[in-house]
Each structure stands twice: as C-alpha cells, then as structure tokens.
Image (cartoon, coloured by chain):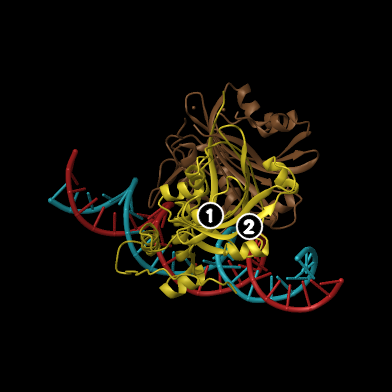
Chain colours: A brown, B yellow, C red, D cyan
Amino acid sequence: MRETPAHQPRVLLDRSSPVPLYHQMAAAIRELITSGELPPGTRLENEVAMASRLGVSRPTARQALQDLVNTGLLVRRRGVGTQVASEVIRRPMELTSLQDDLAAAGRAPRTEVLAYDVVTAHGPVAEALRCPLGASIVTMRRLRYADDQPLAILTNHLRVEVAPSRELLEEHGLYDALREQGVQIRVAHQSIGARLATAAEARLLQERPRAALLTMERIALDDSDAVIEYGTHVYRAQRYTFDTTLIRR
Amino acid sequence: MRETPAHQPRVLLDRSSPVPLYHQMAAAIRELITSGELPPGTRLENEVAMASRLGVSRPTARQALQDLVNTGLLVRRRGVGTQVASEVIRRPMELTSLQDDLAAAGRAPRTEVLAYDVVTAHGPVAEALRCPLGASIVTMRRLRYADDQPLAILTNHLRVEVAPSRELLEEHGLYDALREQGVQIRVAHQSIGARLATAAEARLLQERPRAALLTMERIALDDSDAVIEYGTHVYRAQRYTFDTTLIRR
DNA sequence: GACGTCAGTATGTCAGGACAATTGCTTGAC
DNA sequence: GTCAAGCAATTGTCCTGACATACTGACGTC
C-alpha cells in the first residue's frame, strides 16, 4: 500500500453546462495546480477512482488528465499513478491598436470581453509565442464595436506573466493595458487574409452566415524582441479595409 | 455529397509490433504528409471509414488523427471532416509585382490576358487616374496562375500613352513591361479588403460560388508623382495572404 | 543485506456503442 | 438571385467493458 495518500482534487461538474465534462475537469484541476493548492509532487487519486467519484466514465476522466499531461501540468506513468509535475515552467508592444484608431476617427470604440481563459500552450500558439508546450497562457476573445455595431472579433494569446487582467481589458485596449504594465510593443509581424465567417462568428458580428471576413494574424514583440502576443483577428469585410502606402526603395 | 473524393491514406498496421496501433497509424499518415504525397488541402476519408478499412476501432483511429492535429499536420472540424493542413501564399506587402514574387518563390507564375481594351475614362477610374473624362485609357484584365492553379484576377487601368501592349503583357508582368518603356513605379497607395466572389469570378478562379476573396485596390505613381495605374485585384483567400512587418517609431 | 518472486496498483491500449453538435449541400419557395 | 428549411456527412463527447503492461512493495530465501 502506498504511504502517501492520493489527493482527491475538488472538482464540481455541471452536466447542464455546454462545456464538455472532460474540459470542466481539466480546468478545475488546472486551477488547483496553478493556485498552488496542489503543489508539485502531489499524487492524485487513480483515474478509475476519480472517474467513479465524479460520476464520469474512465475515458472521460482520462481525457481530462491527458490534456493536463499534454500541457506539462501532470505526469503519469503506468503502475505509478498521476502526479503534479515537479515544476511548472515559468518564463518573462504602432503599430497602433484598433481601439486607438477608432477613437481617433471618432467612431465610438467599445469592447466586450467574450472569454478570458488561462490555458496551456500547444501547437501553433506555443510556436508563435515561443514558449514551451504546457506553459500557461491567457487566451482572450473580444468583440470590438465601432459606432455601436460589431466590427471585429479579436482573439489574443499572451503569456500569463504579461497578460493584462480581464478587468483591465474591459476598460482599455490590449496595447494600452500592456503599457500600464510596462510592456512596450515595438514590432509586429502580421499576415492579412480572408475567409468565410463561421455561423458563430456571423452571429457575433451580426452578419449573415458565410459573409466574407478579413483576417489578420499578428505576432507582436517588445523592446527586447520577446514575443508578447499572438493574435488572430477577423473583421467584417463589409466594413473594414487595411490601407497602406508602399514606397519602393 | 461532397464533390472531391476523400483520400484513403495508405497505412499498413502490424499487430505483432509493440508499437501501439494508433501510433503506427499516426506515423504512416505523417510520413505521407511530410513526403508530399498528401498535399495541403487534401481531405481524408472520415474516421469511421478509416477505422473500418484499417480494421481498428474508431477511438483508436481517432487518437491517431488527434495526435496529428496536435502537431499541426491535420485540421478537423465536425460536419466537415479531416484535411491536411493547408498552405497559403504569403506575400510580403512591398511594392513588387505579383509575378516577380511568385517567380522568386518558385511558384511557376503564368498569366492569361482575358481582356485588353482601349476605352474612355469615366467615373472612379478617371478620378483615380487623374485624367479628364473621355480620355483614352487601356483597361486590361488578367488571370494570374501559380503552380498551374488560378490565383488572382487582376484588373488594371492605365493611360493609353503608357500602357504596355497586349503582346508585352503576355510575356511580362505589368511592372516589368512598364520598366521596358522607361516608367518606374515608385509609390503605391493600396487598400486591402475582402468580399465574396461573384459567380463569374468563382468560375475563373475555379472556386465554388461565393468563396471568400481577398481584394486589393491600388493606385501606383511614378517618379514624378504622376498616376500611372489604377488596379483592382482579387485573390483566392484560401491560397493567399499579405504579410507585413510593422515597426513603431 | 541482497535477491527473486508475486500480488497489488495503476495506467496504456483497444473495442464497441450511442447520441449531440456543427457544417455544408440540396431543394423549394419567393 | 436570395433565403430558409431539411437533411446528409462528419466530428465531438461520453459511455461500458476488457485485457496488457509497467511499476511498487511485501515477503521468503540464501
């Protein structure tokens, strides 16, 4: 019998929620880990017991735990069990903001924060932010209005250390919020494209389904060339263009 | 029913191998992708069919495909299917010609002149070219290919005095042709946007109707600030993005 | 004290099944 | 030509079940 008792993470599942059960589990455990309530090294109860205690199937519990493994928060070995990873990896912006531009143009900018989540970096987001898989990042999603009409959906990923709080974002544009925290965006690489709106995007933007969207993907770096932000924005093509003047050298 | 047939990736599974089945599947598909045998955009057979064909369970096939999604090689969406993550043409937003950029990227540029007409200027065209109403101008319309696939429809208006001949345009890009006549483009004002394709554009670009198009409207000036060209281009959004790097001053 | 065996623990892998949700195409009405 | 409804296609989510494999600790033997 093992000496150290296995920890039973406090997880409350809401089956009426549209959020998948596995995702609720993963989020709850992640929160316990990042808050310090589950310190590194803590062994969790085995997945069969956890599944039974929470009233979910083992594959569901397994998927939740596996997501946390993929993020570097948990370590699992067969025959041994699941434990909190010994170390959560920690790491340290004219190019103008849309909010400033709209304000300058007298277009009554307004922003609605749709989502603000602390998640773990993976795939292209980890690559763009130049952080290891599993690092905590903030993913935020905002709806930008101009003249009281939706204009753009802004999705930004930032490292958790520099991400402004949700409260700050309710009041300011992202780059202003970053400046308040001493982060100066200096360079941005961006890629402009287009595609059709998904049904959800169309609804948010009050567009008809499959309207054309102008897309912009951006990686922003600070004074020391550290990647601060990776963002993907979509704009209503009907109401938005990018203008530029090019000069041959 | 979908038009394009779903690809059945060639996967051989060895059940006597200690390598898990899901891992063998993922490795085989990864090899097909990285070798180029499964080019970007290819749609794969659905996971139920693939599982059945390979003699594995759906969760097993699903895990293999999910691993490939996690590594950025596949894209999956419910109701749509699984496809090889696609590759877009990224064009730096510099004052260069598309023909030159494509050639430099080894993308086999080719141009088909669809129309070449001498007409009289009116409306926005006259305004953009800063010439009197009724002045003779050349309006040309070209279809630009990359890798033998249509990429863009280019419509350009020029004063008849500087417009290259149709023959010259069959051989060269517009800016090269202008250079041959001693005209140097130095500045361009451009506006990037998006919209849905018309039926005719969709046909020319071999896109489905109402596909998203990336649009670019440009006014180009020469060394003495004379307006030389007014152009409106549309690009297949699925295959094209504009890239730029912005620096705060 | 060292070593081997064995049982218990726990995760890894795989199967089959079912319903939900999203997407895109077709069709008919206007 | 546009729009809405219906439906097919396909993935997403969740369930039950079972066997395989790696790891750990207890125990007996030398």
Viewed as shown, does residue B76 lie left or right of B119?
A: left
Label 2: few (<14), some (14–19) or many (≥20) C-alpha neighbours in 10 Å: few
**Residue at left 32%, top 69%?**
B14
Callout 1: helix, strand or loop?
A: loop
Please, is residue B139 above or below residue B180 in the view? below
Q: Quadrant of the N terminus of chain B?
A: bottom right
Q: Nearer the viewer, mark 2 or mark 1?
A: 2
Kind of residue sitting beneath label 2: Asp
Q: Nearer the viewer, residue B105 or B88?
A: B105
Callout 2: helix, strand or loop?
A: strand
Q: Are marks 2 and 1 on the same chain?
A: yes
Of all chains, the one bearing label 2 is: B
Kind of residue sitting beneath label 1: Arg
Viewed as shown, does residue B30 lie left or right of B59?
A: left
Please, is residue A249 above or below residue D12 in the view? above
- Cα distance in 3D space between marks 2 and 1: 29 Å
Q: Which residue is mark 2?
A: B117
Is residue B93 among the parts visible in the rendering?
A: yes
Label 1: few (<14), some (14–19) or many (≥20) C-alpha neighbours in 10 Å: some
Q: Which residue is mark 1?
A: B239
**Residue at left 58%, top 50%?**
A23
Q: What mark, if any, has residue A179 been given in the picture?
A: none
Residue A22: x and y in percent read: 57, 53
